[in-house]
Image (tube, grey):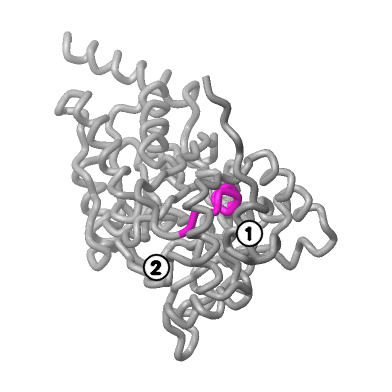
Amino acid sequence: MSEFRQVTLKEVAAKAGVSLMTASRALRNQANVRNKTRQKVERAAAELNYRPNPLISALMSYRRSSKVIRDTVTIGMITNFPSRNGWRSARINQAFYEGAGEACKRHGYKLDEFWLREPDMTGRRLSSILYSRNISALLIAPLPVALGHMRLEWEKFSSMALGYSLAWPRLHRAVNHQFRSIRTALRRLRKMGYERIGLALKASIDERVEHHYTGGFLVDQHRVSSSRRVPLHVVPDKDWNEKAFIAWFKKHKPEVIVTHHESVLEWLARSGTKVPEETGVIHLNCPEATGKWSGIFQNGPSVGMAAVDFLVAMLHRNERGIPALPHTILVEGTWVEGKTLLPKTAYAKPRRNATARREVHKRR
């Protein structure tokens, strides 16, 4: 078996006729290297079949992140809401940001926001600004609408998206495992004895999660008898209102409502319905894990951390541009016992007694 000899960076630099430092910077696609020089180094590396030594790369990464000046190395978080701070209105986005910031600190980076809708800003101009500041890693914040597009000079950057809202380009992304989240919630409800379960959502929310909410809910409905099924109340945003919701609720009488909207509690209260005594409510994206709401905590900080971990690994591998095969990192949600749902001991036992009483009444 023939021995394999690792081509060194020094050999690449010599073939390209540049210094060792210039060769290193060129292969890491840094902004302070001219395009002509970068192309010369890349050709030399390809001709010599140069491959970075992963152990050396890891060591150099560690040394860079251990320096006192490490906080000057920046990952840019790109936001694209109509207003500069509009993205902060969704608590899950704040959670993503907090987790991403923690991961950046751990890796020796800092996280800075860049608003794509600055006056006179274009994708090309922002790309140039980022590149000139030696920012080569981008975290794309969730967009204000589903199926959104964003135009940057992607070939210059290692990029990672948060959530599903960015439809183009198809980047690597980190998200909560929403299909598993709703399946976890429904399994928990079935075990607690709930039978008639209803899903009430704005259609835009379901679209933002690639229809994983309705998909998981319909799987559950398919597995139960028709008498226990509750029609979806997933309506266009313009039709999401108290009157339509209460009409659906009174017609189908769900024992528990699965939703993403806190307004449901107010609407039920005004209709004279007691939560959780008469109807339970669970939140698919609990604002916090304190127990105010029953439902799923999506572990937003962990999603942000996972995104940055993957993004930093891309930087170490010098992976830029739109990936040929995008990866999706799925982070599990956590069930939260809260105040909007009666526990099994308080709900299931009385329900069994009520059922038994009905059976006795029928026999009579």
What residue is at 43 percent from the left and 60 percent from the top?
Answer: 321
Of 27 and 346, the residue lying toward us = 27
- In the foreground, 298 or 53: 53
Answer whether residue 358 is visible to the viewer in this image.
yes
Whole-percent x, y for residue 91 in the image: 53, 59
| Residue 102 higher or lower than 36, as above or below | above
Q: Nearer the viewer, mark 1 or mark 2?
A: 1
Residue positioned 60% across, 72% down in the render: 33
Q: Report the magenta residues as a range.
A: 312-320
User: Which residue in the protein does label 1 denote?
Assistant: 13
Q: Nearer the viewer, residue 362 or 243?
A: 243
Q: Position of residue 213 (x, y in %)?
A: 32, 43
- Image quarter of residue 203: bottom left
**Circle 2 sits in a helix, a strand or a loop, which is it?**
loop
Instruction: Give the percent coordinates (x, y) of residue 239.
Output: 23, 64
Looking at the rendered structure, the secondary structure element under dot 1 is helix
Three-letter amino acid code of the residue under disc 2: Pro
| Disc sitting over residue 144 in the figure | 2
Whether the magenta-drawn stretch holds residue 147 is answered as: no
| Residue 34 in which image quadrant | bottom right
